[in-house]
Amino acid sequence: MSGWMVSFETAPAVGTILTADDQRFRLEAAEPYTRRDGTASALLTWSSSCPTCGAEFEVRSGLRTKSLTRRCEEHRTAGPIGKRSKRIKITVVEPPEGGGE
Ligand SMILES: [Zn+2]
């Protein structure tokens, strides 16, 4: 498990908030799919706002990913700001509703 920025066993509920340092990512959609080897997985769509310009953007990931894009399309290619491998603190905030199981 070490080295994963995001690691879920199953797809989290839509509305789940993930924070990486001070940046928030909100889960907009989770589409289940089956990998070619038969393993169940999911494609997660996160929305966030660019820390450089504030523009909203969406980024997709699998259940596990080592990195999430943290800037809009314009700024993600602008420069190697995130190149330094700094340890990012990830917190997952469950959505307020959806309990009961
Ligand atoms: Zn931007």
Image (tube, helix red, strand yellow):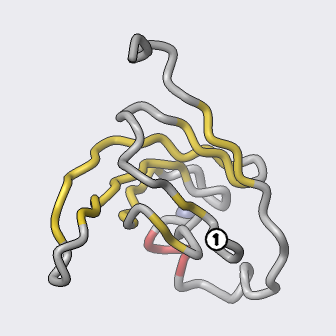
- Which of the 4 image quadrants contains residue 57? bottom left
Q: Residue at x 28, y 44 (%)?
A: 29
Side of 51 where 25 appears, left or right: left
Q: Indicate whether 20 appears above or below 80.
A: above
Q: Residue at x 56, y 66 (%)?
A: 71
Residue 19: image x %, image y %?
Answer: 66, 46
Disc 1, SS: loop
Nearer the observer, 45 or 32 = 32
Q: Residue at x 58, y 75 (%)?
A: 66
Q: Indicate whether 84 appears above or below 28.
A: below
Q: Is mark 1 within 8 Å of ligand 1?
A: no
Q: Residues within 10 Å of mark 1 (few under 14, many from 20)?
A: few
Kind of residue indicated by mark 1: Met
Side of 59 where 29 appears, left or right: left
- Identify the image quadrant of the N terminus: bottom right
Residue 48: image x %, image y %?
Answer: 50, 49
Side of 36 where 2 appears, left or right: right
Residue 88: image x %, image y %?
Answer: 78, 64
Image region (quadrant) for ligand 1: bottom right
| Number of numbered labels in the structure image | 1
Residue 5: image x %, image y %?
Answer: 63, 66
Side of 65 where 21 appears, left or right: right
Q: Indicate whether 86 appears above or below 32.
A: below
- Identify the image quadrant of the C terminus: top left
The residue wearing badge 1 is 1
- Which of the 4 image quadrants contains residue 41? bottom left
Q: Residue at x 20, y 52 (%)?
A: 31
Nearer the observer, 81 or 16 = 16
